[in-house]
Image (cartoon, grey):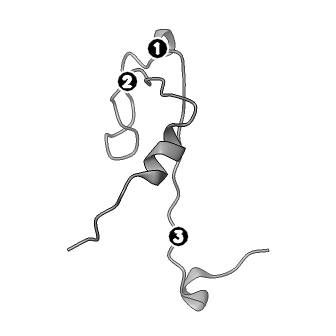
Amino acid sequence: MQSNAPKCGVKRAARHLTLNAVSNSIRTPTRPEFITHRDFTPIKTVPHDALTQLARQPRQAAE
């Protein structure tokens, strides 16, 4: 099913995420920074319940 965003009042944005081994990182970027970021910092592992811990933290209302 497809719909027109202006008609249904929904804003849409496309996002993509590409994960590669650090050994397979891009050496010479060919796309502009606003299309593809150039930060190839390795992903850090977190505990298996990290999202649960984050969700349980007290939150402060936005000002």
Q: Is residue 7 left or right of residue 63?
A: right
**Which residue of the protein is positioned furthest toward the left in this rendering?**
63
Q: Is residue 3 left or right of residue 56?
A: right
Give neighbour class at mark 2: few <14, some 14-19, many 20+ (Cα, 10 Å).
few
First of labels 3, 2 by sequence position = 3
Say left or right for 8 vs 13.
Answer: right
| Circle number at residue 60 | none
Q: Are marks 2 and 1 in contact (CB under 8 Å)?
A: yes
Mark 3 vs 1, N-terminal side = 3
For label 2, the residue is: 40
Residue 62 vertical placement versus 10 (above, below): above
Check disc 3 and report the residue beneath it.
12
Foreground of the two, 15 or 33: 15
Local crowd at mark 3 within 10 Å, few (<14), some, or many (≥20)? Answer: few
Q: Quadrant of the N terminus?
A: bottom right
- Type of amino acid under label 1: Val
> Residue furthest toward the right?
1
Mark found first going from the N terminus, 2 or 1 = 1
Label 1 secondary element: helix
Label 2, label 1: how many angstroms apart (C-alpha)?
A: 7 Å
Residue 41, position as x, y percentages in the image: 36, 23
The local secondary structure at tag 3 comes to: loop
Which residue is the site of mark 1? 22
